[in-house]
Amino acid sequence: MFKVAVFVGSLRRESINRKFAKTLEKLGQPSFAFHYVELGDLPMYNDDLWADPPASVLRLKADIASADAVLFVTPEYNRSIPPVLKNAIDWATRPYGKNSWAGKPASIVGASPGVIGTAVAQEHLRYLATIIGLILMGQPEVYFSFKPGLVDENFEVTDETTRQFLESYLSRFEAWISRVGEPKEA
């Protein structure tokens, strides 16, 4: 079982991206143990704070360090990634020489009620992922159009074709982690 640090880019209680992450979590059992990384209590990045780093920042870095892989589940805000994700990315790359992201297997997905999903936000996040040293899975890309009724209240996918696609994605992610990840000691 792989421990995956999940970064949901929306803090909204009823976020469709959080629902999508929960759906992937359910479909991915027992191959994955999802750990949802708290982003809402991170202060805005300020290099001066490293003199006495906030507990939330140290927790963020520890969550990444203890994970076998990283999964970003991002909405799209104004054709880019949400500020909460960018802030977490910035905190975890510092202090200089202690980039928590470097060498971690990663994948990016996102959900939107629209037909193009979160394509532009994901493209921006893919660019950042390579800069910060994540080992990013390229295919399949998942631009999930979250339509009413497609996922029920128990995070079950109601459409067979969609379920098969998402299971295939998760199988590929598992293989990616196996191939490029560093084994963790139990």
Image (cartoon, rainbow, N blue to C red):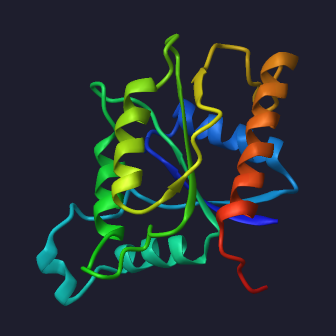
Quarter containing the N terminus: bottom right
Q: Residue, x 42% and y 43% (percent of image)?
A: 126
The quadrant in which residue 161 appears is: top right
List x then y, in percent, for residue 97.
Answer: 30, 82
List x then y, in percent, for residue 11.
Answer: 43, 45
On screen, 161 above or below 69? above
Q: Nearer the viewer, residue 63 or 55?
A: 63
Q: Residue, x 66% and y 75% (percent of image)?
A: 182
Q: Is residue 146 visible?
A: yes
On screen, 37 above or below 116? below
Left or right of 4, for residue 26: right
Residue most extreme to the front: 179
On screen, 121 above or below 177? above
List x then y, in percent, for residue 93.
Answer: 32, 69
On screen, 86 above or below 91? above
Q: Nearer the viewer, residue 55 or 33?
A: 33
Q: Residue, x 74% and y 24% (percent of image)?
A: 151
Left or right of 38, for residue 46: left
Residue most extreme to the left: 48
Q: Residue, x 73% and y 14% (percent of image)?
A: 149
Quarter containing the C terminus: bottom right
Left or right of 65, for residue 162: right
Q: Is residue 155 visible?
A: no
The quadrant in which residue 32 appears is: bottom right
Residue most extreme to the top: 115
Give the number of marks: 0
The quadrant in which residue 179 appears is: bottom right
